[in-house]
């Protein structure tokens, strides 16, 4: 008989230990990481999508009652690099799901381990064994010693190509010594916040009101297939970005949320009537080999989803992009000034490696359901 059970997180499972890397995962607001579930399942649907893949299945409780389940996993992009794909799971397949239950919806979980019929247990962030793959691993590997022209035919420094966020140990964004803010914590001179970091920054009264109105578990931009902001989206989850240069503009194709941003090189001033947007309106110019970008016209939004730092439509930003020739990295730094909501500038920096693969569509499809909705917006409310 199929069954599921709840056990303390500290208990030892015969199915295999779960990686401690999940202990402080940002899913904590949505899933109870202190409770573990084990569900024998028959797969009904496998949705290999971004921002999170989902597996749908039938499970039966201890009273013999069958229920439809939906469990969230990591992004399709991230799992693809581990060997998972749209054919890894299929309707009628028998699995055991080990995970954590949703906080606001029954029969929903976050997957920690997949246990196949032969007893092999694979964590959602483990590489899938070769005998369980239907294709090659979709790796994103920084190319080493690639021969690239330093300048394009039009004289612009060459920043074109496919780029992916530098991993731990990668060259820091300030390695060239040009254009990067001083070192500091997230949001105040360091890299954008990651994981459970909650950067602190001074807010105006209006900023505090906006912060109080923001509830991360319901308003996080990713839940709504929204990029959030140009700074966070550029490096989020190490999706591959594509930079294309033209004589009059530079186009940034974000791997996250399929967002496209244009930096105009043929303008000295912004138009008078800029239509507010997530990307705003950007004009750029070259200072030696550094691209300097000025942007206005942002919509009100959130700079740090986990840190609950809002931005108003008065925000402007200055960014710098340059190539570190020694490390072959594309580095960028930014300073955002917002007299509406922020008392001090919001700053950060990032470093990108050349990618062995190009941009691939993100195709955001969200299945989070009632677990991520306000009570009044839930089905049957």
Image: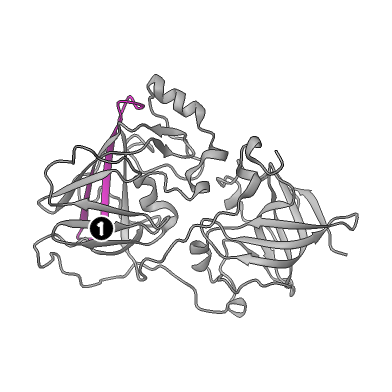
* Quadrant in which the C terminus appears: top right
Q: Is residue 146 above or below residue 310?
A: below
Q: Which residues are magenta?
A: 319-345
Tell me where residue 68 appears, x and y as whole percent: 76, 58
Q: From the viewer's perspective, tell me whether residue 189 is left or right of residue 125.
A: left
Colour scheme used in the picture?
Answer: one colour
Give the image quarter of residue 324: bottom left
Q: Nearer the viewer, residue 331 or 108?
A: 108
Q: From the viewer's perspective, tell me whether residue 48 is left or right of residue 336.
A: right
For the question of whether residue 180 can be seen, the reply is yes
Residue 374 lies within the magenta run: no
Q: How many marks?
A: 1
Tell me where residue 62 appears, x and y as whole percent: 88, 55
Mark 1 falls on what kind of element? strand
Residue 326 lies within the magenta run: yes
Write the residue at 34% across / 45% down: 231
Tell me where residue 257 appears, x and y as whole percent: 43, 55
Q: Nearer the viewer, residue 252 or 168?
A: 252
Looking at the image, the residue that sits furthest to the front is 273
Q: Which residue is mark 1?
A: 251
Q: Residues within 10 Å of mark 1 (few under 14, many from 20)?
A: some
Looking at the image, the residue that sits furthest to the right is 63
Q: Nearer the viewer, residue 134 or 36?
A: 134
Q: Is residue 203 above or below residue 217?
A: above
Q: From the viewer's perspective, tell me whether residue 208 is left or right of residue 351.
A: right
Tell me where residue 371 appears, x and y as whole percent: 65, 45
* Quadrant in which the N terminus appears: bottom right
For the question of whether residue 14 can be seen, the reply is no
């Amino acid at each position: 008989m199929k069954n599921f059970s709840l056990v303390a997180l500290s208990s030892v499972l015969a199915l295999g230990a779960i990686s401690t890397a999940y202990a402080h995962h940002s899913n904590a607001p949505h899933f109870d990481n202190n409770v573990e579930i084990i569900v024998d399942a028959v797969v009904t649907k496998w949705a290999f999508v971004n921002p999170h893949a989902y597996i749908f299945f039938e499970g039966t409780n201890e009273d013999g009652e069958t229920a439809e389940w939906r469990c969230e996993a990591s992004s399709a992009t991230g799992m693809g690099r581990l060997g998972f794909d749209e054919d890894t799971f299929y309707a009628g397949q028998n699995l055991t799901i080990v995970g954590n239950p949703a906080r606001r919806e029954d029969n929903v979980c976050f997957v920690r381990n997949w246990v196949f019929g032969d007893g092999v247990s694979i964590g959602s962030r483990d590489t899938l064994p070769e005998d369980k793959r239907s294709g090659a691993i979709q790796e994103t590997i920084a190319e080493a010693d690639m021969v690239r022209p330093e300048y394009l035919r039009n004289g612009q420094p060459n920043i074109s190509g496919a780029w992916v966020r530098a991993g731990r140990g990668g060259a820091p964004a300030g390695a060239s010594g040009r254009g990067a803010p001083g070192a500091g914590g997230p949001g105040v001179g360091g890299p954008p916040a990651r994981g459970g970091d909650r950067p602190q920054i001074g807010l105006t009264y209006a900023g505090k009101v906006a912060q109080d109105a923001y509830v991360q578990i319901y308003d996080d931009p990713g839940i709504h297939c929204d990029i959030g902001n140009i700074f966070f989206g550029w490096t989020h989850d190490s999706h591959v970005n594509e930079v294309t240069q033209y004589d009059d503009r530079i186009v940034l194709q974000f791997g996250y949320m399929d967002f496209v941003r244009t930096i105009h090189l043929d303008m000295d001033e912004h138009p008078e009537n800029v239509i507010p947007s997530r990307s705003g309106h950007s004009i750029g110019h070259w200072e030696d080999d550094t691209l300097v970008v000025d942007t206005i016209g942002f919509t009100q939004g959130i700079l740090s989803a986990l840190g609950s730092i809002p931005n108003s439509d008065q925000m402007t930003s200055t960014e710098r992009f340059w190539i570190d020739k020694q490390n072959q990295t594309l580095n960028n730094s930014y300073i955002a000034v917002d007299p509406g909501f922020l008392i001090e500038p919001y700053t950060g920096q990032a470093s990108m490696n050349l990618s062995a693969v190009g941009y691939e569509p993100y195709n955001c499809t969200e299945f989070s359901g009632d677990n991520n909705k306000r009570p009044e917006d839930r089905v049957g409310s």
